[in-house]
Image (tube, grey):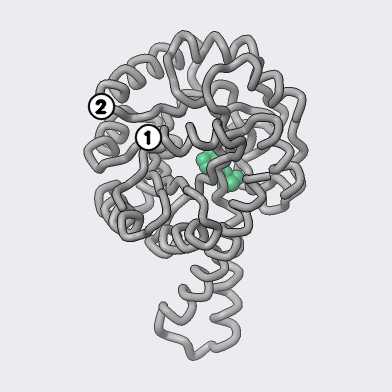
Amino acid sequence: MPLTPTARILRTAERDGFAAGAFNVIQLEHAEAILAGAQQAKAPVILQISENAVRYHGGLAPIAAAVRAAARACPTQAALHLDHATGFELIQEAAACGFGSVMFDGSTLPWEENVAATREITDWCHDRGLLVEAELGEIGGKDGAHTPGVRTDPGEAAAFVAATGVDALAVAVGSSHAMTVREAALDLPLIEALRAAVPVPLVLHGSSGVPDATMAAAVTAGMRKVNISTHLNRLYTEAVREALAADPALVDPRRWLGPARDAVAAEVARLLGVLAP
Ligand code: G3H
Ligand code: ZN
C-alpha cells in the first residue's frame, strides 16, 4: 500500500490512546525488520532516517528509495519520517523523496533563533503537506552535548508551539539518547502537565533507556510518538556477534544479518504492544 502520512498515524494514536512506534533505519535490514515487526503486531509504524544516518550513507536518496519501496510492499500502515534534521536542504530533499514528516531539531539554538528557523521550515513543509516535529529543551545525551537533567517547561512548550505552528513536539522529560541500559526514570507528572498545556502530540526521544513499564506509563500520561533506536541496534549487533562467534568460517552476510534482522523484528513487535497499553 502507499505510504501512510505520519499525521494520520498520530491522529489515530491520539484518538485511540496509544503511541506510534518510531524506529530508526540505518540499513535496509532495519526497515525490513521494523515492517515485519509491525505486521506481526498489526500496528502502524513510523520508519525514520536521521541526519546522522544520511551522513553515514553519504546521501538520503538511495536509502530513502529502498525504505520507501519496502514500506510500499508491506500491508501494514507505514510512514516515512526524517529524524533530527538540522538543515533546510536535507528537509527539502526529504520532501522530494516522499517523506510524510520531518523533525527539525533546533534545540541547540537560542530560543529566538529556534523559533524563527522552526517557523520558516514549518511554513514551507505545510505548503507541501508535510508534518513537522520540533524540539524545545535539549534531550539528554545526544552526541554527548546535552545533560540528562534537562526538562521542558510546559508554558514555554505551549508558547513555542503557538509561535512556530509545529504539529508535534519532542520534549525533555528524563530520557537520554543512546542509553544501552534500560533504567531511565521519566517525569510522569511533567508529561501530564505538558499534555495539558500543549495542543499537539508529544514525542519521546531517547526511549532506548526507558524500561517497558515506564514506557507504558508515559503513553498513558500522554506520549503519542516514541522514538527507539539504540536498543534495537544493541540487539542487532548482539545477534551478529553471536552468529559470527558460532561459526568463524561464515562469509555470506545473509547468514549473520538474517538473525540480526529477525531479532529486531521480534523486538519491534513486542515494543509496539508496550506502546498500546
Ligand atoms: O530520534 C531518535 C531517538 O530519539 C532514538 O534514541 O537511540 O536513545 O533510542 P535512542
Ligand atoms: Zn532523538
Residue 190 % position (x, y): 72, 23
Instruction: Indicate the quadrant containing the C terminus: top left, top right, bottom left or bottom right.
Output: top right
The structure residue drawn at horizontal position 40% and vertical position 83%, both measured from the top left corner, is 252
According to the picture, the residue beneath numbered tag 2 turns out to be 128
Q: Give amino acid for label 1.
A: Ser
Q: Give amino acid for label 2.
A: Arg
Of residues 9 and 152, the one drawn nearer to the viewer in this rendering: 9
The structure residue drawn at horizontal position 58% and vertical position 72%, both measured from the top left corner, is 239
- In the shown orientation, is residue 206 left or right of residue 108? right
Badge 2: how crowded within 10 Å, few (<14), some, or many (20+)? Answer: few
- In the shown orientation, is residue 69 left or right of residue 260? left
According to the picture, the residue beneath numbered tag 1 turns out to be 101
Q: Is residue 254 above or below residue 168?
A: below
Q: Quadrant of residue 69?
A: bottom left
Badge 1: how crowded within 10 Å, few (<14), some, or many (20+)? Answer: many
Q: Quadrant of residue 140?
A: top right
Label 1 or label 2, whichever comes before in sequence order: 1
The structure residue drawn at horizontal position 54% and vertical position 46%, both measured from the top left corner, is 21
Q: Is residue 153 above or below residue 189?
A: above
Q: Is residue 258 above or below residue 40?
A: below
Of residues 59 and 64, the one drawn nearer to the viewer in this rendering: 64
The structure residue drawn at horizontal position 65% and vertical position 17%, both measured from the top left corner, is 196
